[in-house]
Each structure stands twice: as structure tokens, then as C-alpha cells.
């Protein structure tokens, strides 16, 4: 598929003085993720000062037992520190080792706001499409009682946690689609970068609670969709926003689990999934269900058509 090879992301990756071997890329990605986890240590110390020994239980529980605004604040801070560290470490790698600017990861300034706003809107629409599929088959209903605030009491927490999602989405996209995909695509072939980055993205979620086989497939499909979106746009701005909006809408707009994690800070709606887990996703959330599979396959198909015709159709 030669129409993939001239993406702006590949042009930017060719500025690297050292294109890493696939095994080196994997080792570096793992090292960055491990080191980023240490970025939260100062926050743990701060929490211990304020809350004592119960601080660790708060963190391990995902701040679920805290007042919504406080839980949203601390969770957002942890997301910013942990995933922001991924961005910093990756920037150091490309600057010091590959001898190129971090902007070549796909964060060029030209048209960034338009791409970001469009990507954010597409992310919300895609998750709304998932909810629509669930509702169409009678597998999503409003829950009468909620253990967390819903609109309008949830608005503060929903906005606060949104800041954390913005950083989280950008960091995961920078590591997989901004760095791993184009560097491997240039060193080998475009499909190699797409395949490895998509599989790595799925495997990196392997420790999430309530993970199952369909969840892994869907995560890999999201990786494929994200790769095609980023390559078509030639930028990371749009897919970073889409990724953030997907998670934020899933948890804090519709009240569903996000990759096995219950939303923090409340939600604007509180939907309950009903029906077989293979369709709804069960405890992992929609990403482990066939409804997400259908939406992602549709999105991939539309991107493939758009790429072949040299235009985007989303």
C-alpha cells in the first residue's frame, strides 16, 4: 500500500539520525513506561503527609472512596505526572539519541488547533456511536441509582478529570503512533510500524483489571484505527484529542468503565450495560464488547477508503 508511505509522519521520522531496531524500540518503550511510574513517587509522599498510611489504599483504590471533586483532582494530578513523564522522557530520547526535535513526533504547529478540535469531536461521536449501538440492542439503559454524582452535581469533577485525560491520550499516542509507528515504518516498511505499534498498544494494557481476549482485540483495533488516522492527517494533534475524548466520554460523559477502571469524579449520565458481556464488555467496559468492535471496524473501513481516495471521510 504505497499510499501510506508519503505520510508527513514518515517525513518527520526521516529526520532522525538513528532509527532504532524494532527490539530497541520495544525496550525503550518499556523503559519509558517503567521510569514514568516513578514520577508519581513525590505525589505518594505528599499524600502520605496529608493522609498517613491510608494514602496507599487511596491510590490503589483509584480514589474511588474519596469525595468526587477531591478524587477527580488527585486522579487528574496522577495522570498528568505519570503520563506527562512519558512525554518528557520520549522528548529526551528523540533529542539526545535521534538528534531531532520533539515536534517531529507529529506536534508541528501548523493547523494544530483545527486538528485537535476535530479529533476531539470525532472521539466523542465514536463513543456516542458505541452507546447508540448498545442502546439499539437494548443493552444500555439509564441507571436509577448512582454511586457517584451525575449531572449537574458532577460537572466540576468531570471537567477536572478531563485535564488528566488530555495528557494521558497525548502521551500514549506520542509513544506509539508518534514515535514507534513512523520510526519502524521508515526503517522497515509502513505496515511493520502499523502492526507493531498496534500490538504493543494492546499489550501495554495487559495489566488492566477484567481484561479478556476481546478487549485485547479491540485495543489492537483501536491501535490500527489510530495509526491510520494519524498517518492520514500527518500529525499527532487529532488522534491525541480523539484518544482523550474517547476515554473522557466513555467514563465521564456516559458513566461507563474505561478499560476496566470505573470513572472518577462523576459523570454527566450514568448508563448501565445490560445483556451478554461479549456484546457490552461487562466489567471491563465497552472496549471488551462487540459494540466497540463494530464501531472501530467501521472507522477503519472509512479511513482506508479515505486514504485510497486521498481524502478523509470521517
Image (tube, grey):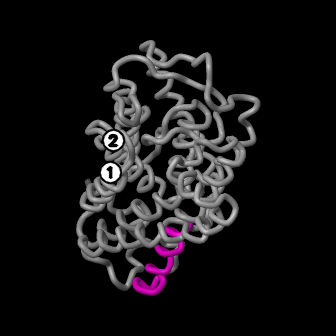
Question: Left of 272 or right of it: where is 222?
Answer: left
In percent of width and height, residue 86 lies at 49, 68
Q: Is residue 153 part of the magenta span, yes or no? A: no
Most distant residue in the front direction: 53
- Mark 2, secondary structure of its residue: loop
Towards the viewer: 7 or 245: 245
Q: Is residue 89 part of the magenta span, yes or no? A: yes
Disc 2 target residue: 211
Vertical arrangement, residue 190 with respect to residue 63, above or below: below
In percent of width and height, residue 206 lies at 32, 51
Crowding at dot 2, Cα within 10 Å, few <14 / some 14-19 / many 20+, comes out as many
Q: Residue at x 28, y 53 (%)?
A: 199
In percent of width and height, residue 267 lies at 64, 33
Q: Classify residue 151 by image quadrant.
A: top right
Q: Residue at x 48, y 54 (%)?
A: 233
Vertical arrangement, residue 125 with respect to residue 309, above or below: above
Most distant residue in the top direction: 138
Q: Residue at x 59, y 55 (%)?
A: 54
Q: Classify residue 21 by image quadrant.
A: bottom left
Disc 1 target residue: 206
Vertical arrangement, residue 83 with respect to residue 239, above or below: below
Q: Classify residue 231 by image quadrant.
A: bottom left
Q: Residue at x 35, y 74 (%)?
A: 28
Number of the label disc, if any, that sits on residue 305: none
Q: Main secondary structure of the magenta part?
A: helix
Q: Mark 2 and mark 1 in contact (Cβ < 8 Å)?
A: yes
Towards the viewer: 79 or 70: 70
Magenta segment? 84-100
Q: What distance separates the C-alpha of mark 1 from that of mark 2?
A: 7 Å
In percent of width and height, residue 17 lies at 37, 85
Question: Left of 244 or right of it: where is 265?
Answer: right
Amino acid at each position: 500500500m504505497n499510499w501510506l508511505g508519503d505520510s508527513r509522519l514518515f517525513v518527520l521520522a526521516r529526520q532522525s539520525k538513528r532509527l532504532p531496531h524494532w527490539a530497541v524500540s520495544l525496550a525503550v518503550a518499556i523503559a519509558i513506561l517503567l521510569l514514568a511510574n516513578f514520577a508519581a513517587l513525590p505525589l505518594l509522599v505528599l499524600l502520605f503527609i496529608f493522609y498517613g498510611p491510608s494514602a496507599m489504599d487511596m491510590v490503589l483504590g483509584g480514589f474511588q472512596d474519596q469525595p468526587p471533586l477531591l478524587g477527580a483532582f488527585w486522579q487528574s494530578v496522577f495522570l498528568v505526572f505519570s503520563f506527562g513523564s512519558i512525554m518528557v522522557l520520549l522528548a529526551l530520547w528523540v533529542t539526545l539519541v535521534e538528534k531531532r526535535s520533539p515536534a517531529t513526533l507529529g506536534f508541528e504547529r501548523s493547523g494544530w488547533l483545527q486538528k485537535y478540535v476535530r479529533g476531539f469531536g470525532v472521539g466523542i461521536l465514536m463513543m456516542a456511536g458505541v452507546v447508540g449501538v448498545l442502546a439499539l440492542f437494548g443493552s444500555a439503559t439509564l441507571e436509577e441509582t448512582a454511586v457517584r454524582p451525575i449531572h449537574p452535581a458532577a460537572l466540576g469533577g468531570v471537567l477536572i478529570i478531563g485535564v488528566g485525560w488530555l495528557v494521558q491520550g497525548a502521551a500514549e499516542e506520542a509513544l506509539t503512533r508518534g514515535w514507534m509507528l513512523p520510526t519502524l515504518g521508515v526503517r522497515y516498511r509502513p505496515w511493520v510500524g502499523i502492526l507493531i505499534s498496534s500490538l504493543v498498544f494492546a499489550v501495554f494494557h495487559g495489566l488492566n483489571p477484567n481484561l479478556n481476549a476481546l478487549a485485547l482485540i479491540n485495543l489492537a483495533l483501536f491501535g490500527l484505527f489510530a495509526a491510520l488516522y494519524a498517518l492520514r492527517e500527518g500529525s499527532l494533534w487529532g488522534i491525541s484529542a480523539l484518544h482523550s475524548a474517547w476515554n473522557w466520554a466513555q467514563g465521564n460523559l456516559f458513566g461507563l468503565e474505561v478499560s476496566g477502571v470505573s470513572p472518577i469524579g462523576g459523570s454527566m449520565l450514568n448508563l448501565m450495560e445490560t445483556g451478554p458481556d461479549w456484546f457490552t464488555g461487562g466489567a471491563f467496559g465497552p472496549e471488551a464488547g462487540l459494540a466497540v468492535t463494530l464501531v472501530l471496524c467501521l472507522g477503519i473501513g472509512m479511513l482506508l477508503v479515505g486514504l485510497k481516495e486521498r481524502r478523509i471521510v470521517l
